[in-house]
């Protein structure tokens, strides 16, 4: 299985290349995959926030459960502070 960080970083690249649908699918996979004790909290949160950004850019609805998940895995806003989402 691919790790959360690998999946969301691949999604970052796809988004930067303008492949929004492919990026959205990878962010979703990274966000929703079960977390192990070895998965850094910031990676899980970053994947979910990437999914939120991708859905927003494709003008799709953002499920409230997704926002709750993103907030629940990163209580400090470390993932939000990264500010390295690719520009559209």
Image (cartoon, grey):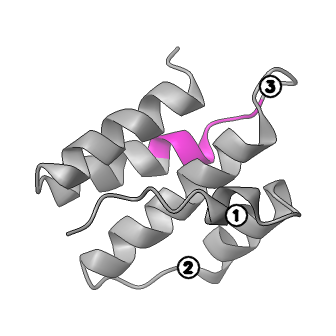
Going by the picture, which residue comes out furthest to the top?
1
Assess disc 2: are there few (<14), some (14-19) or many (≥20) residues with their C-alpha within 10 Å of its C-alpha.
Answer: few
Q: CA distance from mark 3 to mark 2?
A: 24 Å
Q: Which residues are magenta?
A: 29-35
The residue tagged with tag 1: helix, strand or loop?
helix
Residue designated by label 1:
70
Q: Would you say 2 lies left or right of 77 here?
A: left
The residue tagged with tag 3: helix, strand or loop?
loop
Residue designated by label 3:
36
Seen at 81% across and 20% down, the residue is 38
Seen at 62% across and 37% down, the residue is 33
Q: Is residue 79 magenta-colored?
A: no
Q: Which quadrant of the structure image shows residue 72?
A: bottom right
Assess disc 3: are there few (<14), some (14-19) or many (≥20) residues with their C-alpha within 10 Å of its C-alpha.
Answer: few
Instruction: Looking at the picture, tell me which residue is in the foreground, 35 or 50.
Output: 50
Residue designated by label 2:
63
Image quarter hosting the C terminus? bottom left
């Amino acid at each position: 299985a691919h790790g959360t960080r690998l999946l969301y970083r691949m999604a970052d690249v796809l988004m930067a290349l303008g492949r929004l649908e492919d990026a959205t699918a990878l962010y979703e996979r990274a966000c929703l995959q079960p977390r192990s004790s070895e998965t850094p909290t910031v990676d899980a949160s970053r994947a979910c926030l990437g999914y939120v950004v991708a859905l927003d850019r494709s003008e799709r609805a953002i499920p409230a459960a997704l926002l709750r998940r993103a907030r629940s895995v990163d209580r400090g806003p470390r993932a939000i502070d990264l500010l390295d989402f690719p520009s559209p």
